[in-house]
Image (tube, coloured by chain):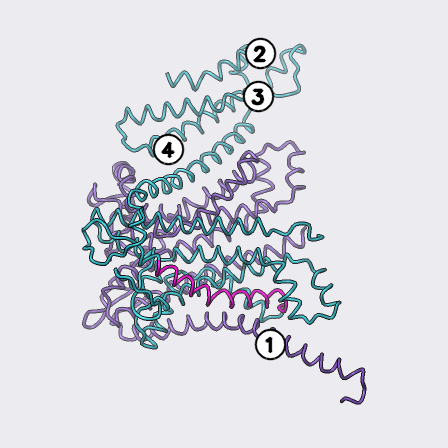
Chain colours: A purple, B cyan
Amino acid sequence: MDTSPNSAPTGVRGKAVRAGDRIFRGLSRGSGLALLLIMAAIAAFLGYRAYLAVSRDSVDFLTSFEWNPQGHPPAFGIGVLAFGTAVSSVIAMLIAVPVSVGIALFITHYAPRRLAGPLAYLIDLLAAVPSVIYGLWGALFLVPYLDGLTRWLDHYLGWTVVFDMSEPGSPARSLFTAGILLAVMILPIITNVSREVFRQVPKSHEEAALALGATRWEVIRTAVLPFGRSGIVSASMLGLGRALGETMAVATVLSPGFAFSWRLLDPGSGTFAQNIAAKFNEADDFGRDALIASGLVLFAITLLVNGAARLIIARRKEYSGAAA
Amino acid sequence: MSRTDTTAPAQRSSRGGTADAGERPVGAAHRRGATDVRLAKRRLPRWSSPLVAAGSAALGCGAGAAAGWHNPVQWALLSALLFVAATYVLTAAVEGRRQAGDRVAASLVWVCFLAAVVPLVSLAWTTVRNGSGLISGYFLTHSMGGITNIQPGGGIYHALLGTLEQVGLATALAAPVGLLTGVYLVEYGGGRFAAAVTFFVDVMTGVPSIVAGLFVLSFWNLGLGFGPSGFAGSMALALLMMPVVVRSTEEMLKLVPHELREASLALGVPKWRTIARVVLPTAAGGITTGVMLAVARITGETAPVMLLVFGNPLINPDPFAGAQESLPLYVWNQYKLGNDASVDRAWAGALTLIAFVMLLNLLARAVARWKSPRGTGR
């Protein structure tokens, strides 16, 4: 080994280099692996606890409409939660998606240039407002404010059942209000992602449309929106993921109650996350397992929604990379 | 009065152009005679938009007040509708349908923007107005010890302390793992394993905070039998923080010019030293910003803290033993008590929390601006 004066130092050096590299590489690879393991562990632990609970459930966990894990025999199901989560998220999406796309267009295409930068910054900051503060604002400010609107809806659109209130004048602590609050909360997310996408629209597309005599709206309709469509879809799904899992804001606004009703303006219903927050403190160990089971369902749903959103984004990246 | 406002621009602009062209299709003016040929189409004057806006606002509020609506939101909605309708009719009459569509789209975009700004301004205003009354040196330096639920007074010192400890621990757990994962993805990655990590990091970003809380609960508390503690909360917060750190590290490392790495490697510097001494310092500003934004995000998380830290009206400086308090949890608990004194405390806590988070955000952005790469040869 030492016979050749030239190779000895490089050999030793090479070994040292390889050791340092191997450690560093191993560390960083291990961190990546740790992340994957954590995801797997989340699924495994929640799954195990959920199994403990659901195996003793006396009714069908997925379709039953009651929540009574303390009963003999315990009976609990996620029917109400699935319904409430879906309805509040759908209301949030119906409001937030068009408005966010509007704001994103405003920032990228309509706002005076001097205003656009600070506006984008402001929207970024809004995404950082903690959800419990949205909840506080929703419960103490939005709920009294929406009283007039819900009365009006009940009065003129009550025949649709959806907007009927069984007791007109009861406080607006309903799925409808929760949906509106969620819309306000997911607005910054959808706006930010859509804005990024609109910004990537090739200038040549817009200029081509303008050269053909298109008005500003026609440019947006023919060049910007088609290019940004998949971006809007994935932005909306990211927003949906947040709306589905939002806990504190919904728990603050919605009055607790475990009733299934198509009357969206009536107070009292539940979502997955809200139900966990509301029932956790009074639950015994088995009750907690039952709540974990419902949390597992929420986990699976958000996983699907976010995964789909990311796949759409990834596909779009390839596409736009090829086109650019 | 408001009615004449909305119609005024139409009359005036038709008076300014050819006589009574307002009623005829646009092409008619051109067909009538060679004396009147103009290449540019007729446009509404610039001041017509604000005028229509003022008119419809006046009309909307007037009608709202007349109909006895007490809710200004309904007035605003009616005004917005009137504005869009008036703009369309006016533009269609003077400039043509396509221009009218354009104007309507523009006004809808403006309405969207205003509709978003209103709740946000209201949120900020309500929090500052309701919260600022109670904030004082006393409030920031005392706990809730010895204060009954309906009694005014008390403070958030215990909550501040708890939040700082929990967030600090969470950062200590999440930042190294996140940083190294980001390094792996950019510097070593490229295989199927890296693709899987990237995908799951993205998916992990979307894990609801309460699910992270439930996971730590099922693993740490129910599985291993520990009681609630600040550290349990930190673990859940770390889970929420990791993917954010990974993403921002990744983005920042991608911005480091390849020439720097190549120059270092060409000098015979081993790869890990290249990363540690050349790549990471270059990206340090951006990475710091990313970590601070992630800290800001987890500071406001309530759900996992509620499940795992439990809440405690007294000062508990030890995050590893016993229930603690945290700022968002304090806000939630005080709100739940539901009497005047506690709701006041909730608002004051909310203001402190929001100020803390915003301060972190501003600092993070200041770091980003201060450390932003200037003239790095690209």
Report helix, strand or loop for mark 2. Answer: loop
Residue B179 shown in magenta: yes
User: Which residue is tagged 2?
Assistant: B18
Callouts 3 and 1 close, C-beta under 8 Å = no
Residue B43: which numbered mark, if any?
A: 3
Span shown in magenta:
B161-189
- Mark 2 falls within which chain? B
| Closer to the eye: label 3 or 1 | 1
- Give the mark, 2 or 3, whose residue is nearer the N terminus: 2
Q: Quadrant of residue A16?
A: bottom right
Q: Chain letter of disc 1? A: A
On whether disc 1 and disc 4 are found on a single subunit, the reply is: no
Asked whether residue A152 is in view, the answer is: yes
Measured Cα–Cα span from mark 4 to mark 2? 36 Å
Q: Disc 1 on helix, strand or loop? A: helix
Q: Residue at x 62, y 12 (%)?
A: B32
For the residues labelled 3 and 1, the Cα–Cα distance comes to 71 Å
